[in-house]
Image (spheres, rainbow, N blue to C red):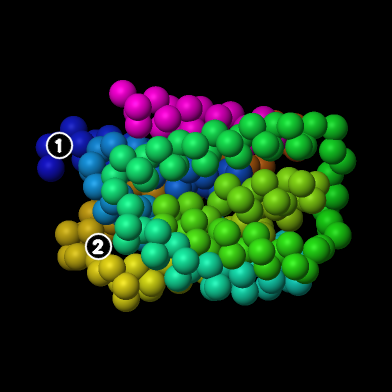
Amino acid sequence: MPPFDWFLLTTVSFVAALVQASTGFGFAIVAVPFYLIILGSLTAIQVSLMVTLVITVVIAMRVWHAAPPALLGRLVVGTLVGFPLGIVAYRHADLETAKLAVGLLITGFAAWLFLAQRGRPVVENPATHPFADVAIGIVSGAMTTSLGMPGPVILIYLSLLATGKEAMRATMLALFVFSNAGAIAFQEWQVGIDGATWTMAAILIPAGLVGAAVGHGVSRYLNQRTFRSAVLAILAATGLYMLWTSVT
């Protein structure tokens, strides 16, 4: 791989980890589109899963205790059910289809979040909806094994529940540890992950860890309004860029 491509991958990993640490989500949303473009194969999804797992474990250890246990448990159950559904989609996808799906998914979620959250109050301990929790977990699990993106649907759901910043961040991070670990296991079992992919992920992890350290510091200075604005900006910009690259 050309040195400049390595530079781009490293930079993307740093920025994506910074976003993940400061907002509680975002590594895959930022990294997967650019990984797909740079690597030109679905290997990008496997690399993202592995780098995200290490970074998320480090971040989640500091905040997981703020996640509502019942809500998190039901999301985990649903995620496990969704894993095999996503693997089926992954095995039948090609690069262009994946790029278009990612772009549409992210852009649609950005629009939904913008319309749904306007004027909603913030609730640190939101009311739970057992069946909806499991259903959302299933969708998230399928999205993890197929696109490496467990976050968008979880973000939208927690926003609709008007979850506060700390509870949302903790719930997403704790769930992503399980999601990414499980998705890697399913990918290895059903598709296979070659040695070059493991090596690439190992090389990119240090840049991600540095970005996570910076992002954790940044998170202390994000108030609720700034947090929501950052979420929307990340989703909208990444989704639109991905759509543009998929049709040009």
Dividing the picture into quadrants, the one containing residue 90 is bottom left
User: Rounded to the nearest whole Å, what is the CA distance between mark 1 and mark 2?
Assistant: 19 Å
Residue 110 on image: x %, y %: 61, 35
Q: Which residues make up the magenta segment?
A: 228-248
Question: x, y (%) of residue 33?
Answer: 38, 39
Cβ–Cβ under 8 Å for marks 1 and 2: no
Residue at 15 percent of width and 37 percent of height: 3
Q: In this view, does 28 lie above or below 78?
A: above
Q: As displayed, is residue 197 above or below residue 20?
A: below
Q: Which residue is outermost to the front? A: 92
Labels 1, 2: front one = 2
> What is the quadrant of the C terminus in the image?
top left
Tell me the residue that label 2 is attached to.
Answer: 198
User: Which one is in front, 147 or 127?
Assistant: 147
Q: Is residue 244 magenta?
A: yes
Name the side, left or right, on which 28 lies relative to 225: left
Seen from the viewer's position, the closer of residues 84 and 221 is: 84
The reply to whether the magenta stretch includes residue 41 is: no
Residue under label 1: 3
Callout 1 environment at 10 Å: few (<14), some (14 to 19), or many (20+)? few
Say what amino acid the circle numbered 1 marks: Pro
Disc with the residue nearer the chain's start (1 vs 2): 1
The residue sitting at 53% across, 55% down in the picture is 150
Mark 1 secondary-structure assignment:
helix
Left or right: residue 143 versus residue 66 is: left
Residue 176 is drawn in which quadrant?
bottom right
Provide the major secondary structure of the magenta segment.
helix
Q: Residue at x 58, y 47 (%)?
A: 152
Identify the image quadrant of residue 117: top right
* Three-letter residue code for mark 2: Trp
- Label 2 sits on a secondary structure element that is helix
